[in-house]
Image (cartoon, rainbow, N blue to C red):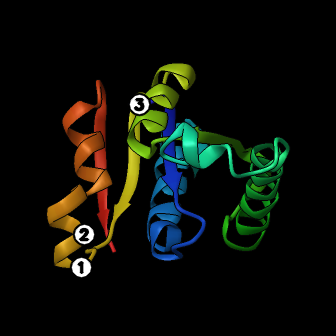
Amino acid sequence: MFDTILLPIDLEHHASWKKALPAAEKLADDWGATLHVLTVVPSFGSALVAQGFPPEFERHALERASAHLADVLAADARDPDRIVTHVGHGRLHEVILQAIADTRAQLVVMASHAPDAVREFLVGSQADRVVRRSPVSVLVIRG
């Protein structure tokens, strides 16, 4: 049914992969699909803030995220060698949407956990942003 599946995860929140990773792996196995797992290092939000960090900070952050992602998959994935990993940098939903295009994903599997009411009101759910803008189907796994 789907040849390529994208699973975005937040390395700081175990809930983002606890249920979604096994579900995505099962779907990939059932359909013979390639599973891509993406994590995103958030952007600074402004150039002014970014100026306060050393030039190599971003590179180190991306390297740490890549190593952490490998550790998570080694510990929690059934077959980590079959998973293609990606580390992005920027605004979460924008990076996910770009990854959909770059990987030619036909399905996105992602977790949605209930943030506190104030945060939800101010920034909205990242899963909701992806669902509303995605050119492909999105399976939201409730955490």
Q: Amino acid at mark 1?
A: Asp
> Residue at left 32%, top 63%?
141
SS class of the residue under badge 1? Answer: loop
Marks 2 and 1, Cα distance to the nearest angstrom? 6 Å
User: What is the crowding at mark 3: few (fewer than 14 residues within 10 Å), some, or many (at least 20)?
Assistant: some
Above or below residue 112? Residue 143 is below
Quickly name the residue at label 3: 97
Ranked by sequence position, the earlier of labels 2 and 3 is 3
> Residue at left 34%, top 75%?
143
Marks 1 and 3, Cα distance to the nearest angstrom? 25 Å
> Residue at left 53%, top 62%?
10
Q: Which mark is residue 116?
A: 1
SS class of the residue under badge 3? Answer: helix
Quickly name the residue at label 2: 119
SS class of the residue under badge 2? Answer: helix
Report x, y in % for residue 15: 45, 75
